[in-house]
Image: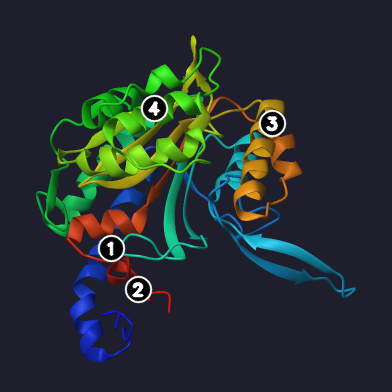
């Protein structure tokens, strides 16, 4: 039985309450920091015309019934990203949200179908500023939980130590012995056969119909991620452009993008971008993602045309999403995401 399945039992709640109060303190400390940085808290609607347009992201569908009885398919958002970028287009410059988000096909120690995402944007600033924000939040979490180290299972991470920053290509070389860039052409397109040969060489299994992206993800999860954020925080930077549908490319190198992820104790905590603001390029990327989704899962999601229209008005910006529940987990050494949620999903 899931230990949090009877969270409403007074005895169970008494055991859980110290962690939940730490959660509240961490959230309040982050809000204080963002207020001091002149951020405005916003509250994006959860219902959307599209849950997101990444191939392996799965939304919850529902129906809105109008006063005339007409039915309209809608979705619970997987991220407040589209709505928040529309606010940037409208003229906001520093915004954040603690949003409940929903993702289907996700359940486990680090995953819940419904969870809390902290997302924030800085208009007119580079994505490096988001790296600093994230490190501040990790340190605030440790302080509010009264600990010096973040922990998950048998791994520990010192959030107060200087963070390690390395490129995805460097991480693949160091931890997997894979020359990732050899499988990426100068224009950013990928060579699946070349990467497949690398997997064969290091003895990592693959299927005959694996795409380059499939193999990239397999190496990342099996060989790279377990080594990240051990002892100190790791910032994994310069993701391949093929793995960054919403990020702009690095100036002068079309192979890689302004995308980074933050890891502690082998756990991915945050995913940040230098945001793509070209609506035509974004449409092409979304269409390619939905074609891949249709190929793999026999379904796809509509594009949010309002979002694509708003991109034409959106200023240069950097944005990031952080799994707030996971941050609380690491600060309190909780083994499961359900343990840090006030009311876990049944």
Label 2: how many Cα within 10 Å (few below 14, some 14–19, many 20+): some
Disc 1 is placed on an element classified as helix
Closer mark to the observer between disc 1 and disc 3 = 3
Q: Position of residue 116 (x, y in %)?
A: 42, 59
Label 3: how many Cα within 10 Å (few below 14, some 14–19, many 20+): few
Count of number-bearing discs: 4
Q: Residue at x 64, y 33 (%)?
A: 285
Of the residues under marks 4 and 2, which one precedes in the sequence?
4
Q: Position of residue 99 (x, y in %)?
A: 48, 57
Which residue is more in the foreground, 228 or 36? 228
Q: Residue furthest top?
A: 252
> Which residue is under mark 2?
342
> Which residue is under mark 1?
23
Q: Is residue 84 visible?
A: yes
How far apart marks 3 and 2 lie (CA) works out to 40 Å
How far apart marks 4 and 1 lie (CA) works out to 46 Å
Q: Is residue 122 visible?
A: no
How far apart marks 1 and 3 lie (CA) works out to 40 Å
Do callouts 1 and 2 mark residues in contact (Cβ within 8 Å)? yes
Closer mark to the observer between disc 4 and disc 1 = 4
Disc 2 is placed on an element classified as loop
Of the residues under marks 1 and 2, which one precedes in the sequence?
1
């Amino acid at each position: 039985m899931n230990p949090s399945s009877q969270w409403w039992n007074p005895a169970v709640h008494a055991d859980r309450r110290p962690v939940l109060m730490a959660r509240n303190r961490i959230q309040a400390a982050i809000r204080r920091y963002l207020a001091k940085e002149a951020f405005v808290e916003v509250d994006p609607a959860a219902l959307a015309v599209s849950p997101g347009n990444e191939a392996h992201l799965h939304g919850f569908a529902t129906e809105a019934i109008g006063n005339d009885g007409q039915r309209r398919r809608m979705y619970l958002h997987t991220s407040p990203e589209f709505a928040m970028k529309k606010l940037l287009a409208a003229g906001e410059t520093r915004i954040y949200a603690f949003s409940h988000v929903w993702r289907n096909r996700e359940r486990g120690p680090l995953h819940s179908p419904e969870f809390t995402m902290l997302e924030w944007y800085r208009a007119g600033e580079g994505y490096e500023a988001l790296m600093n924000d994230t490190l501040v939040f990790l340190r605030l979490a440790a302080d509010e939980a009264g600990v010096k180290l973040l922990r998950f299972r048998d791994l520990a991470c010192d959030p107060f130590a200087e963070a390690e920053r390395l490129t995805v290509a460097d991480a693949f070389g160091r931890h997997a012995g894979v020359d990732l860039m050899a499988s990426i052409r100068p224009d950013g397109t990928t060579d699946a056969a070349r990467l497949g040969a690398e997997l064969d060489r290091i003895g990592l299994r693959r299927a005959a119909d694996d795409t380059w992206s499939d193999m990239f993800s397999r190496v990342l999860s099996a060989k790279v991620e377990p080594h990240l954020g051990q002892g100190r925080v790791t910032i994994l930077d310069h993701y391949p452009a093929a793995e960054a549908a919403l990020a702009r490319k690095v100036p002068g190198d079309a192979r890689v993008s302004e995308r980074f992820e933050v890891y502690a104790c082998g756990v991915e905590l945050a995913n940040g971008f230098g945001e793509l603001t070209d609506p035509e390029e974004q449409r092409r990327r979304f269409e390619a993602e939905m074609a891949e989704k249709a190929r793999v899962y026999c379904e796809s999601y509509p594009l949010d045309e309002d979002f694509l229209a708003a991109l034409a008005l959106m200023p240069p910006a950097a944005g990031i999403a952080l799994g707030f529940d996971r941050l609380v987990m690491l600060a309190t050494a909780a083994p499961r995401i359900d343990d840090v949620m006030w009311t876990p999903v049944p």
